[in-house]
Image (tube, rainbow, N blue to C red):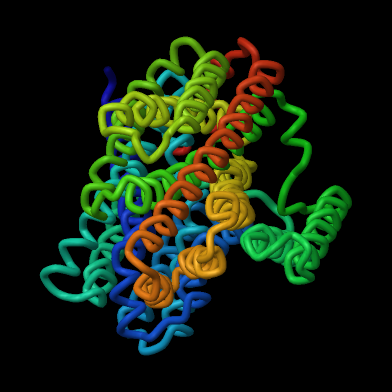
């Protein structure tokens, strides 16, 4: 191997290490709010609505910023966007650490989502740019492994910080790590040359797309209070109209935020729809099965539930690098179809879960779900990115990541609405004719709203046998609606597999990576 090639290879692996480190930190601290929220709620006296916004503000800001960050990276350079993004992320961490109210906490979380959102497309773009076609899939798999590892260790880190120090230190300790990401990125990319595109920035498109996504997500989340409420259908209607206007604007502007011509390439469009299906089913499954089913239905402790869900997240994390190498050899089509089919089988299996389900019965479907996601994500990212021109890399990367995260938020909202709409009906059916039916419905509503004090007071007001019947009716209702939700998600995964088969089939990625060659040698 020549000295020139050795330098280029060393630079590429250094870039991969730096981008993976940044991905790990970003994912790690996107998940810490879950374990910390009960303590934050007590310290800052957060209402139920403010607790919800503490979680969703990050995902909504992240999804919207992905659109902005992809195009900005193409205009000003990927490295600049990473540095700016992590500076914004660090500012959000400081604001959250110092928060004295729910508004400040939500503002900090929003800044964190914006920071990671505008930098995330650049990290994937740089990874793909740095490697040849024969190693691109493996590199994307390693980058995905770092994402998965961050999701795995984030809640564990938060738990230890809560035990040893306080929730504020969960955010404070992330600040120096964020600074380290910036320094490592600058050092690793000193020989990296961005391919910049010309033109102006589409502000109108950003506003229309961002508001449209936010309103549709809000409408689906609010549907748990009833599809007929004005706030639900109004938000959905306005959101859909804004997204339609976004599509019209983007097809008529000379410098679109989203270039719809990308969908003419079957590999990109297939990867886009497949990754949408993965995001739509995976995150809701983790949220509903990993917390509500394990804790509320099976009675696991939060620690036990966290370790059981590692069966899924750990399998996903471990499989991403070898899956990337497999894709380099056989192409993305077969792995994507097989992976979505595996997820469909796993979700239909979870649709049979009930209060009597044992730990042993959980292992295979949870592992199967993780395997499906671990194979699908590197395949979708490699297939989508390998069809792009260099000046489209940031836009394409942002779209591929947005198509995982925005459907994930929509999937969570849909599952929440299904469970909210049917849980009271299930309790009504179970307690019909009982003299304590009204108390049972009030208890179910309190549980649904997260009002533990009211729920406990209702049970205490009832005779012990009646209280047990009410509690059991709610557990059965939760199990039934969760099973219904998993069956719906399984159908979506199956539809994604069929669509991937029809669009991608056995197509292979180009033999040459059109994005490769951005790593320059020292003179």
Instruction: Give the answer, above or below, for where 487 lies relative to 339.
Output: below
Q: Residue at 65% of width from left, 33% of height from top?
A: 273
| Quadrant in which the C terminus is drawn | top left
Q: Residue at 41% of width from left, 88% of height from top?
A: 101
The x and y percentages for residue 220 are 66, 57
Residue 92 horizontal side relative to residue 348, left or right: left
Instruction: Give the answer, above or below, for where 77 lies relative to 328.
Output: below
Q: Which is nearer the eye, 485 or 7?
A: 485
Instruction: Give the answer, above or below, for where 249 lies relative to 346.
Output: below
Q: Residue at 40% of width from left, 24% of height from top?
A: 324
- Identify the residue at the far left of this view: 164
Instruction: Give the answer, above or below, for where 311 lies relative to 504.
Output: below
Is any atom of residue 198 visible in this view? yes
| Quadrant in which the N terminus is drawn | top left
- Identify the residue at the far bottom of this view: 100
Q: Which is nearer the eye, 49 or 173?
A: 49
Q: Which is nearer the eye, 523 or 307?
A: 307
The x and y percentages for residue 290 are 37, 46
Q: Residue at 54% of width from left, 55% of height from top?
A: 431
The x and y percentages for residue 210 are 68, 63
Q: Quadrant of residue 69?
A: bottom right
């Amino acid at each position: 191997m020549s000295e020139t090639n050795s330098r280029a290879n060393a630079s590429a692996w250094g870039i991969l290490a730096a981008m993976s480190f940044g991905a790990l930190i970003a994912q790690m601290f996107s998940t810490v709010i879950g374990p910390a929220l009960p303590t934050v709620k007590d310290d800052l006296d957060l209402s139920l609505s403010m607790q919800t916004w503490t979680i969703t503000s990050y995902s909504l800001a992240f999804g919207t910023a992905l659109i902005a960050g992809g195009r900005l990276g193409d205009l000003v350079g990927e490295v600049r966007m990473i540095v700016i993004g992590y500076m914004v992320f660090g500012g959000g961490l400081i604001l959250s650490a110092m928060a004295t109210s729910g508004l400040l906490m939500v503002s900090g979380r929003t800044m964190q989502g914006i920071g990671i959102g505008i930098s995330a497309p650049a990290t994937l773009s740089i990874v793909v740019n740095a490697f040849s076609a024969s190693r691109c899939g493996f590199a994307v798999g390693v980058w995905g492994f770092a994402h998965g590892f961050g999701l795995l260790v984030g809640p564990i880190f938060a738990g230890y910080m809560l035990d040893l120090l306080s929730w504020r230190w969960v955010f404070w300790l992330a600040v120096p790590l964020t600074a380290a990401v910036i320094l490592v990125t600058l050092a690793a990319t000193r020989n990296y040359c961005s391919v910049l595109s010309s033109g102006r920035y589409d502000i109108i498109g950003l506003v229309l797309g961002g508001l449209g996504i936010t309103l549709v997500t809000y409408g689906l989340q609010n549907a748990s209070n009833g599809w007929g409420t004005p706030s639900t259908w109004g938000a959905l209607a306005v959101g859909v109209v804004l997204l339609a206007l976004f599509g019209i604007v983007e097809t008529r502007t000379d410098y679109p935020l989203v270039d719809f011509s990308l969908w003419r390439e079957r590999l990109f469009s297939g990867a886009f729809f497949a990754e949408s299906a993965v995001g739509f089913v995976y995150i809701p499954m983790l949220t509903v099965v990993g917390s509500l089913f394990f804790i509320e239905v099976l009675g696991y402790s939060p620690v036990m539930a966290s370790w059981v869900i590692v069966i899924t997240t750990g399998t996903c994390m471990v499989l991403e690098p070898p899956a990337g190498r497999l894709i380099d050899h056989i192409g993305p089509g077969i792995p994507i179809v097989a992976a979505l089919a595996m997820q469909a089988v796993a979700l239909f299996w979870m649709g049979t879960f009930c209060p009597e389900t044992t730990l042993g019965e959980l292992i295979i479907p949870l592992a199967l779900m993780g395997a499906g996601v671990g194979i699908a994500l590197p395949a979708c990212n490699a297939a989508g990115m390998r069809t792009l021109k260099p000046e489209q890399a940031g836009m394409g990367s942002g779209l591929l990541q947005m198509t995982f995260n925005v459907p994930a938020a929509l999937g969570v909202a849909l599952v929440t609405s299904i469970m909210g709409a049917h849980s009271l009906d299930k309790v009504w059916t179970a307690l019909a004719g009982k003299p304590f039916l009204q108390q049972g419905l009030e208890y179910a509503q309190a549980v649904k709203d997260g009002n533990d004090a009211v729920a406990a007071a209702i049970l205490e007001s009832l005779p012990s046998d009646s209280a047990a019947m009410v509690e059991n009716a709610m557990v059965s209702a939760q199990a039934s609606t969760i099973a219904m939700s998993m069956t719906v998600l399984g159908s979506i995964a199956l539809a994604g597999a069929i669509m991937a088969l029809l669009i991608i089939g056995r197509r292979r990625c180009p033999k040459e990576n059109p994005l490769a060659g951005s790593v320059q040698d020292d003179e």
